[in-house]
């Protein structure tokens, strides 16, 4: 006669089906917790087969409860320890899940013992009650595995902070609790007909679970603060990076890549702004002389150097509030806020006289009063037209000379 009862029947479909479901749900849960999943056929079989065999076997035969718990622990250990994650993270997850599973299972055994008015040993020898207890435990585990990917904050804390210094005392606490429950499970093998023994088992397990939950809440609050601080730091770094990228983009849009002065788009925006603010200003349109001849005779490299020398020399005579922009190959604009027409013309004539023999240019000036209704295009057109008048006059003077 076998020292334990054996059961073969349809009831074994319960742990088998729940074990299969748990194997697939736990794959998603472990992936969410940061354990890489290869999603191969062997990976899925290895994840499903150990719990399926163990829980079905326990439904078939009355394996001693301490041995069953040890086997359950090692099957968790074997499933997780081949994953590419740190040792402390693996032990944290293994011990926490195994401890809560043991506690729930032993409470169920104690409750059934009280309800049926039999010893816990007799409850475990009956296949029906073995299947009921393991079915409830597996159903709860399936629910937790389904919920884990949806608990964003808890998930992030478990994934990123399980190696934190604050969790080390908690890991010791988990080890002690696991040993305590394993020793407590020996009581389930007792044939002593003391009616308070199941109550003692339930009470001690519930008390342990109470302290476990309190400890978990405390650790969670600490790690949540750390997580929020880390998340804040990451967001600030991301924001700083975005600001730098935006500044670089604005710089590319606002500055001419060759000369380093402003672009047509930027000076146009500034003219629009002054018009909206009803501020007076003068706009100077400049055409650089002799660029085509230099490009044809000496090459474009010499032409580029000519442009650079001109922008540096003219820019040295401008005020800080003035805006100097390149609007074409050899065309430039100077925006002079608050500068009357006569003053602007005198300034440009003085600058041109100083640059004679180095860089020569033609220019046209238009003044925009505070209450102007002109458009940006009209203002640019007037200055450009005045520049061509100046160019024709200078060309005629050179011919007469």
Image: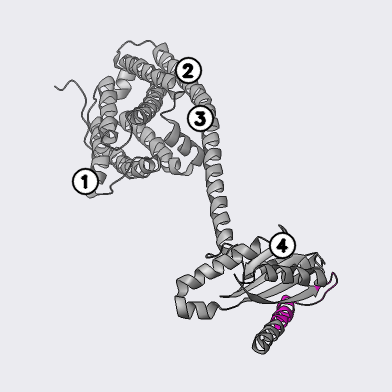
Q: Single out the mark in the foreground, 4 or 2.
A: 4
Residue located beneath label 1 in the image: 42
Q: Which residue reaches farthest front?
A: 401
Residue located beneath label 4 in the image: 322
In depth, the one of 268 and 46 nearer the eye is: 268
Q: Is residue 105 above or below residue 30?
A: above
Q: Single out the mark in the foreground, 2 or 3.
A: 3
How far apart are the two marked residues, 3 and 1, measured between alpha carbons? 36 Å
Task: Say which quarter of the image contains residue 79.
Answer: top left
Q: Residue at x 80, y 73 (%)?
A: 368
The image position of residue 181, as x and y in percent, is: 36, 18
Is 267 positioned to the left or the right of 184 in the image?
Answer: right
Q: Residue at x 60, y 66 (%)?
A: 311
- Give the prevailing secondary structure in the magenta stretch: helix
How far apart are the two marked residues, 4 and 2, measured between alpha carbons? 78 Å
Is 141 positioned to the left or the right of 378 in the image?
Answer: left
Q: Sequence-wise, which precedes: disc 3 or disc 4?
A: 3
Which element carries disc 2, helix, strand or loop? helix
Q: Single out the mark in the foreground, 3 or 4.
A: 4
Q: Which residue reaches farthest right?
A: 371
In the rendered structure, are the residues bearing label 4 and label 2 in contact, judged by CB atoms less than 8 Å apart?
Answer: no
In depth, the one of 189 and 359 nearer the eye is: 359
Mark yes or no: residue 10 visible: no
Q: How is the image coloured?
A: one colour
**Which numbered tag is attached to residue 223?**
3
Q: Which residues are magenta?
A: 368-387
How far apart are the two marked residues, 1 and 2, measured between alpha carbons? 41 Å
Which element carries disc 3, helix, strand or loop? helix
In the rendered structure, are the residues bearing label 2 and label 3 in contact, judged by CB atoms less than 8 Å apart?
Answer: no
Inspect the magenta stretch and tell me whether residue 377 lies in it: yes
For disc 2, the neighbor class at 10 Å (few under 14, some 14 to 19, many from 20) is few
Q: Sequence-wise, which precedes: disc 2 or disc 3?
A: 2
């Amino acid at each position: 006669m076998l020292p334990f009862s054996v059961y073969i029947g349809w009831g074994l479909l319960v742990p088998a089906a729940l074990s299969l479901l748990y194997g697939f749900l736990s794959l998603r849960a472990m992936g969410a917790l940061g354990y890489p999943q290869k999603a191969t056929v062997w990976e899925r079989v290895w994840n499903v087969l150990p719990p399926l065999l163990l829980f079905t076997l326990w439904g078939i035969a009355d394996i001693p409860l301490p041995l069953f718990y040890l086997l359950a622990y090692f099957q968790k250990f074997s499933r997780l320890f081949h994953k590419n994650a740190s040792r402390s993270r693996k032990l944290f997850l293994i011990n926490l899940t195994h401890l809560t599973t043991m506690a729930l299972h032993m409470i169920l055994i104690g409750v059934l013992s009280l309800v049926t008015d039999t010893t816990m040993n007799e409850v475990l020898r009956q296949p029906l009650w073995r299947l009921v207890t393991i079915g409830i435990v597996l159903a709860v585990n399936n629910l937790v595995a389904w919920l884990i990917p949806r608990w964003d904050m808890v998930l992030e804390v478990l994934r990123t902070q399980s190696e934190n210094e604050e969790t080390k005392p908690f890991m010791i606490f988990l080890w002690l609790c696991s040993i305590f429950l394993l020793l407590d499970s020996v009581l389930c093998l007792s044939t002593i007909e003391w009616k308070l023994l199941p109550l003692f088992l339930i009470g001690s397990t519930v008390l342990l679970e109470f302290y476990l939950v309190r400890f978990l809440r405390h650790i969670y609050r600490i790690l949540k603060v750390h997580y929020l601080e880390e998340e804040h730091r990451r967001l600030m770094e991301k924001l700083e990076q975005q600001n730098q990228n935006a500044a670089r983009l604005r710089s590319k849009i606002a500055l001419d890549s060759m000369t380093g002065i402003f672009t047509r788009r930027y000076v146009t925006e500034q003219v629009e702004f002054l018009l909206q603010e009803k501020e007076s200003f003068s706009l100077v349109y400049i055409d650089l002389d002799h660029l085509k001849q230099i490009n044809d005779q000496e090459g474009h490299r010499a032409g580029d150097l000519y442009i650079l020398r001109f922008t540096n020399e003219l820019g040295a005579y401008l005020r800080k509030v003035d805006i100097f922009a390149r609007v074409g190959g050899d065309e430039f604009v100077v925006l002079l806020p608050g500068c009357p027409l006569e003053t602007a013309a005198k300034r440009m004539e003085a600058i041109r006289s100083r640059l004679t023999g180095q860089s020569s240019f033609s220019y046209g000036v238009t003044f925009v009063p505070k209450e102007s209704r002109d458009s940006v295009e009209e203002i640019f057109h007037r200055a450009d037209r005045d520049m061509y008048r100046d160019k024709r006059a200078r060309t005629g003077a050179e011919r007469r000379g």
